[in-house]
Image (cartoon, grey):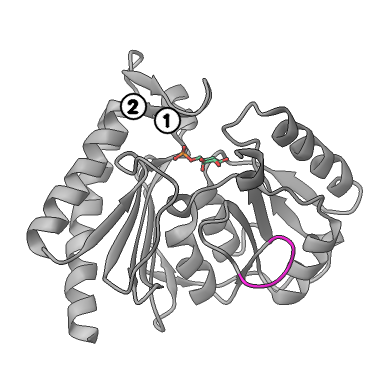
Amino acid sequence: SGENVDLFYNTVLNLTEQAGKIIKENISSRHKNINFKSSNIDMVTETDQAVEKLFIDSLSKEFPDHKFIGEESSSTDQQELTNDPTWVIDPVDGTMNFVHTFPHSCISIALFIEKEPVIGIIFNPMLSQLFTARKGQGAFLNGERISVSDKTSLSDALIMMEFGTSRHPERLRNCLENQQKLMPHVHGLRALGSAALDMAMVACGAADAYFEFGIHIWDIAAGELIVREAGGVIIDPAGGKIERFSRRVLVASSQELAEKLSQQLTQLYPLELEK
Ligand code: IPD
């Protein structure tokens, strides 16, 4: 019920503030303890692990029946959302930025109930940017209501894209090809180094669309609700419904712009490459 969601929201907001302090305290350290995951540009630090542990330990104590999908504790991508309340957590989105002290990293956390996001929070503690949304209640930046831009043509649009965390030749080739195809048609291309913050930029109208092949559910879970509550759309990059475990995403300020961007893209299916 609504009362429960309010309790979940207040609890996670409080933890987000604590977690933000941990990230902010640790970003300036020149000697971070780094481990490598799928490639030498796919990293996890002690801070990622500490923040994820804070969320999972505290939330599971408060809400013992809740489930978790966390970037650092999920051993496999073959996961599923059930109908149970499930927290989807990226403790530090933009780990590469964090490692380099480039101040665009954030906590991204969402609560799904019956497979739909009901709470979404993206917090960049370095720049004090707190993006929040609850289902049906709008999206906010530091408490002020936000909404997407009204740009509907590609030539007016600032598009977020990413270079990703893979060195797979097919992925690199696709990334460059899409840059080359888009550049003549769009107003500008940008990469912030954090999928969640890219989506937050679309939600507040500072950018108009974002797409990526290779993301995971925890990169986009909070952004999905924040973008939708700000009036934007989230689709599969080939058009049609978003598949949250497909490692593919496209968000835009409108369905019209989403479709125009989709038509320009060379598609990539990361799950196929792993086979
Ligand atoms: C990554 C960032 C990056 C995006 C990658 C993500 P992480 O998340 O969002 O911008 O290109 O696809 O995996 O590893 O920093 O949490």
Q: Amino acid at mark 2?
A: Thr
Name the outermost residue toward the top: 31
- Mark 2 Cα within 10 Å, few/some/many (few <14, many 20+)? some
Q: In the image, residue 44 lies at what x, y percent?
A: 38, 29
Percent across and percent down for residue 37 are 44, 27
Is residue 200 placed above or below 128 in the rendered structure? below
The earlier-in-sequence mark between 1 and 2 is: 2
| Pointers 1 and 2 in contact (C-beta within 8 Å) | yes
Residue 43 visible from this viewpoint: yes
Q: Nearer the viewer, residue 196 or 70?
A: 70
Residue 239 falls within the magenta-colored stretch:
yes
- The quarter of the image holding the C terminus is top right
Label 2 sits on residue:
45
Q: Position of residue 196 (x, y in %)?
A: 49, 51
Task: State whether label 1 is within 8 Å of ligand 1.
Answer: yes
Q: Which residues are magenta?
A: 237-241
Residue found 27% across the figure and 71% down from its top: 84
| Residue at position x 41%, y 70% in the image | 144
Q: Is residue 130 above or below residue 54?
A: below
Q: Can residue 24 be seen by looking at this rendering?
A: no
Res 12 quadrant in image: bottom left
Label disc, if present, on residue 98 of the rendered structure: 1
Nearer the observer, 121 or 40:
40
Q: Is the residue marked by circle 1 packed among few (<14), some (14-19), or many (20+) residues within 10 Å?
A: many
Give the residue drawn at x 52%, y 20%.
40
Q: Is residue 67 magenta?
A: no
- Viewer-side residue, 261 vs 78: 78
Left or right: where does residue 145 sit relative to residue 3?
A: right
Label the magenta part by its dominant secondary structure.
loop
Q: Nearer the viewer, residue 16 or 265?
A: 265
